[in-house]
Amino acid sequence: MTRMTRSVDANAGARRGRPPKGTSQLSRAAIVDATLKVIDTDGVTAVSMRSVARVLGVDAKSLYNHVDGKDGLLDAVAEHLLGGVSIPPATGDLRIDLPAIADAFRERALLHPEAAPLVLTRQLASFEGLAPVEALLGVLRSAGCPVEESVQLMRFLVASLIGTLLREVQAGPTFGISDKAGIATRQNTLEDSGLPHVIESAPRLARFDRDAEYEYTVQAATALVLERIRASQASTGVREDRPAQKGQSPTKITKIPGSAAGTT
């Protein structure tokens, strides 16, 4: 074997033992960022181990050290976005606290619109997505709701919020038409449909203001929760005491003055 041959073989061996480009900097956070780039550019359906690895400039197999396949990538993105929800401090007034929690959730969910369905629909096994749930349960318990009713009201609020946000990111007007000419054509088509209330509402159904729809849903849901709590308190009197937190005295919940929760 010549000196040149030995040199070539040594260099080849060094290359074989060297990790792929970018692997040494690979981390779960970097993988999440790369996955979001794929989603922002081409949508959730474009996510794969190969597409994310291509963004990172690494071999797809190296990702398995940090995530468990495509589902792991999607879970990691959902956890990252949900874990970043900034819950505002509670004021003790449900008219303020419930919309504030909803606003914080919406802001984070729509940070990456293409990824929003993951945040809104993905079932996660980790604790990252529980901050909004904890916040809602906390303000409901402070308003005097027993545990069982707090859970039911929380689920109602979450379902209302997820529904309106999914519509915001995935849907448009009922007729899918927003220009005046298209609306007029659709109106003429509907005239013989035998659906008088749809015909009457057609101009409104053809428009979709995302912010207005969201605000209406949150305000309506908040009003229903307040009414439910008032009705429960009227039938049972003083509500259940909220368990004392560590380092705090038990808080006795009394009837809601007006619409806000009161404590003594």
Image (tube, rainbow, N blue to C red):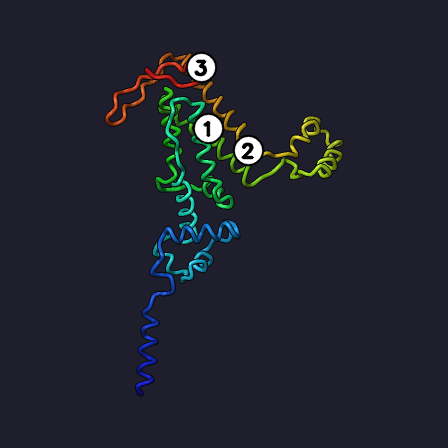
Which residue is the extreme one toward the left? 247
Q: Few, some or many C-alpha atoms within 10 Å of disc 2 (few <14, some 14-19, many ≥20)?
A: few
**Location of mark 2 (residue):** 211
What is the secondary structure assignment of the residue under circle 1? helix
For disc 3, the marked residue is 258
**Residue at screen point 49% across, 42% down:** 116
Q: Which quadrant would residue 136 be assigned to in this image?
A: top left
- Indicate the amino acid at tag 1: Pro
Residue 78 point in image, percent of width and height: 42, 44
Residue type pointed to by label 2: Asp
Residue 226 in picture, x, y percent from top left: 45, 20
Taking 113 as reference, is 155 above or below it?
Answer: above
Question: Does residue 252 appear to the left or right of 79 in the view shown?
Answer: left
**Which disc number belongs to residue 99?**
1
Mark 3 and mark 1 in contact (Cβ < 8 Å)?
A: no
Tell me how far mark 2 sits from mark 1, CA to CA. 13 Å
Which quadrant is the N terminus positioned in? bottom left
Residue 87 in which image quadrant = top left
How far is the residue under mark 1 from the one under mark 3?
17 Å
Secondary structure under tag 2 reads helix
Q: Earlier in the sequence, mark 1 or mark 3?
A: 1
